[in-house]
Image (spheres, helix red, strand yellow):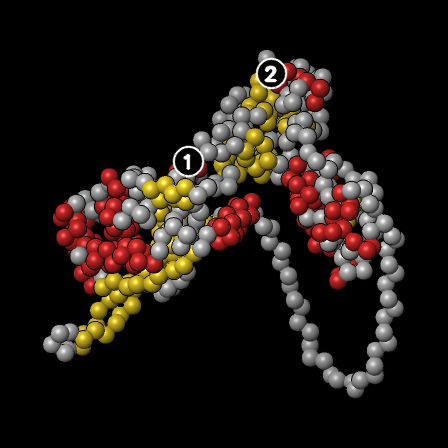
Amino acid sequence: MATAIVMPKAGNSVEECLLSKWRIKVGDVIAEKDIICDIETDKSAIEVEASAGGTVLALFGSEGDLIPVLQTIVVVGNPGEDFSALVPGGAEAAPAVAPAPAAAEVVVEAAPVATAAPAAAVAGDNAPMSPRARKFVAEHPFVVPKIAGSGAGGRIIEADVEAAYRTSPKLSSAAAAMLADGVAAPAAGTGPGGMILASDMGKPAAAPAPAAKPAEAPVVAASPATEDVVTEKPFTQIRKIIAKRLHESLATMAQYTLNAEADVTGLLELRAKIKDNGEKLGLANINIGDMVMYAVIKALQKHPEINGEFADNVVKLHSSVNMAFACDTPRGLMVPVLHNSQNMSLAEMSKTVKVLAKQANDGNLNPDLMAGGTFTVSNLGTFGITTFTPVATAPQLAILGVGKTLLRPVRTKSGEVVYKDYMQFSLTLNHMVVDGAPGARFLQTLTNIIENFELVCIAG
């Protein structure tokens, strides 16, 4: 009996996943738990295991497609078996009989949701486009040339139209609107770089102006040419989402940053004690970053007006501190969340941070563990950064940037000059909700906790 394998639900907050790579083809014989494909969410990369074994009868979707969770992506069963009842979108979207194992690979595209025609002129007949390719064309009005698709069966994928976009004439916004109304677009326009303007619409392409004869110039001996090697790096799905969210955050929030510093002489001495006795005390692997994050959690409990969100003209302040922390990973910025961190001991918090950071770095962190943050910490001090302007993540009200420790001369009450270690902090806030004074008071509390960390740990 034919069996469907569906796109897994990679976290409660995930509605669709990007199919990044197939690991199987039609005709392969697979077993349960075999890896069948790689998928991506906006936060993680996941290897999908087969939930059933058998001969692969059909694959639904191409690499680069966004596929809803719980939709069928693979059908397995016996060669020649009817699987039409398992086809996404209905039986009419699939062949009546599955190909035999020796047949060439066939990728069946599930019946897509109806999509408006993209605002672009298409030169000649092109192969079918993937949903992501159609979306790109709709968002980037240009004259689409004849494209040789690089997807399965010559299908045009997003990378193909992105490459064509870089070398094809673009349409001005007015020309794009005319195109949507049915006015024909020429192959090239009279605007800068061949841009098609509204005045060019409905006309043949303008002939290029003859090149001017160069003026005679003295002969100069040229130095040996050095070849410029340009490497194109694809803009990954996660980078696109990071860029979109940060842009939206800056566009919708009035962000400002306050800078402060704290004397961490005592904190460093305590860290040295923990390092020497951590195994015996059950405090192994606690580092300065953990101690700072613990201090931030304590400070937020004293300043709940900083621990919250703002959206749709509603401010939501939380009693729980869901501490988000930025992680640098091979796939880009990841921000795991310590839910209910106010209930954790220093040792428990340190251990949980390291577990989540490793999962984020390995690309297998559950997306639900990157949702629901009420405040974020970004630590760039280990990279030698002193101060910076972190960007708050909407709808959160604030983010704290942690810089490196600097040795500073300080004059004591007796007039003696001594050197002390000071850690740098940069607090970015949404001025629409939090004014400068509340932000400054939060930093005062934070620096006071850090400078008296031992007492805070004793008090719990």
Disc 1 crowd rating (10 Å Cα; few below 14, some 14-19, many 20+) is some
215 shown above or below 437: below
Q: Please name the residue that numbered disc 1 is placed on.
A: 368
Three-letter code for the amino acid on which mark 2 is drawn: Ala
Decide if residue 1 is on the left or right side of residue 252: right
Where is the N terminus found, in terms of image quarters? top right
214 shown above or below 53: below
| Depth order, front residue of 209/269 | 209
Secondary structure of the residue carrying numbered label 1: helix
220 shown above or below 445: below
Decide if residue 162 is on the left or right side of residue 349: right
Q: Which residue is outermost to the front?
A: 313
| Depth order, front residue of 26/331 | 331
Give x and y (percent) for residue 261.
28, 64
Q: Please name the residue that numbered disc 2 is placed on.
A: 2
The reply to whether residue 361 is in sight is no
Secondary structure of the residue carrying numbered label 2: loop
Distance between mark 2 and mark 1 Cα atoms: 32 Å
